[in-house]
Amino acid sequence: MSGELSPIDKAKFVAAKRAVEYVEDGMRVGMGTGSTAAWMVRCLGEMVREEGLNITAVPTSTRTAELARSVGIKVVSLDEAKWLDVTIDGADEYDGNLNLIKGGGGALLQEKIVATASDQMVVIADISKQVETLGAFPLPVEVIPFGWQTSKALIEETLIGLDVLGRTTSLRMNGDAAFLTDEGNYILDLHLHRIGNARQMSLVLNQIPGVVENGLFVDICDVVVIGYGDGKVEV
Ligand code: 5RP
């Protein structure tokens, strides 16, 4: 399945391959979104088809749902599964406290709901995602389309009182149109460069009218499985 991979893809693949060891027969598994998570879905699909692994998956996006079905994994909704044994997902950044920035792929809302409904969240990432302090990656914030410019202005005003280095925000685009999440919402990317207090930032953002959720995952991730381009893996 892995064939001849570039170092970055190899790093993602080996992290995914190691992380699927957290999955046991009969488990309900949350499946993240993105290029690293896609490796995990393919690995689990292979285990289902070739080893008879019996799992039920709750995907965090239509993209992941389609991929999971295409590799032979049974997909159900979170409401059907009710609770999950483990969620495996990628991240845009993780720090030494296992706090994350997610949402580069625009699936942060379902990702946070699914991870929070799991006994364990395992993050898979290549080493480039490791940071001292979160914030170099723009922080995605999902807002409803109604009055989004007011929400944007309120976010920018709120940032003045917070420990950040940058305060510009941009509407995520898909060509000429606003990018739409699976829920039909917009994403504002916050260019903060440094997030001094991730917990405070997350709480404050979610108080702003129009904000549905933000991409900071604080105290949600339990383990990070780190892949390297030479095939080494660290947990
Ligand atoms: C999607 C996410 C992804 O997990 C994150 O963007 C990492 O993606 P990739 O594995 O492709 O680097 O949060 O919303």
Image (tube, rainbow, N blue to C red):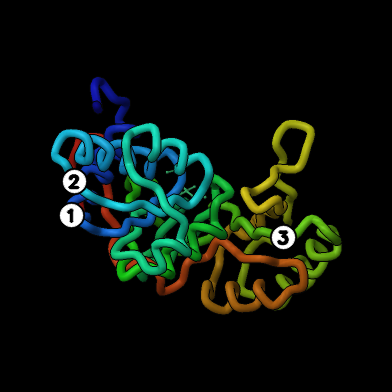
Residue displayed at 26% across by 45% down:
15
Task: Count residues near mark 2 (Cα–Cα under 10 Å), then give few for <14, some for 14-19, many for 20+.
Answer: some
Picture layout, residue 195 above or below residue 179: below
x and y, in percent, of residue 125 in the image: 34, 48
Tell me if residue 69 comes above or below residue 137 in the rendering.
Answer: above
Q: Which mark is residue 171?
A: none
Viewport quadrant of the N terminus: top left
Q: Quadrant of residue 191?
A: bottom right
Q: Residues within 10 Å of mark 3 (few under 14, many from 20)?
A: many
Q: Which residue is tagged 3?
A: 143
Callout 1: SS: loop
- First-in-chain label (2 vs 1): 1
Which residue is the extreme one toward the left?
51
- Residue drawn at x 32%, y 56% is 29
Q: Which residue is mark 2?
A: 53
Instruction: In the displayed orientation, state which residue is furthest to the top.
Output: 4
Asked whether 192 or 101 is in front, the reply is 101
- In the picture provided, is 81 more to the left or to the right than 183? left
Q: Secondary structure at mark 2?
A: loop
- Relative to 39, 23 lies left or right: left
Q: Earlier in the sequence, mark 2 or mark 3?
A: 2
Q: Position of residue 142 (x, y in %)?
A: 66, 58
| Residue 25: image tag | 1
Regarding residue 235, the answer to whether it shows in the image is: no
- Type of amino acid at the residue the image marks with label 2: Leu
- Seen in the picture, residue 3 relative to 94 is either above or below; the reply is above
Do labels 2 and 1 touch, CB within 8 Å? yes
Q: Amino acid at mark 1?
A: Asp
Q: Residue at x 79, y 55 (%)?
A: 145
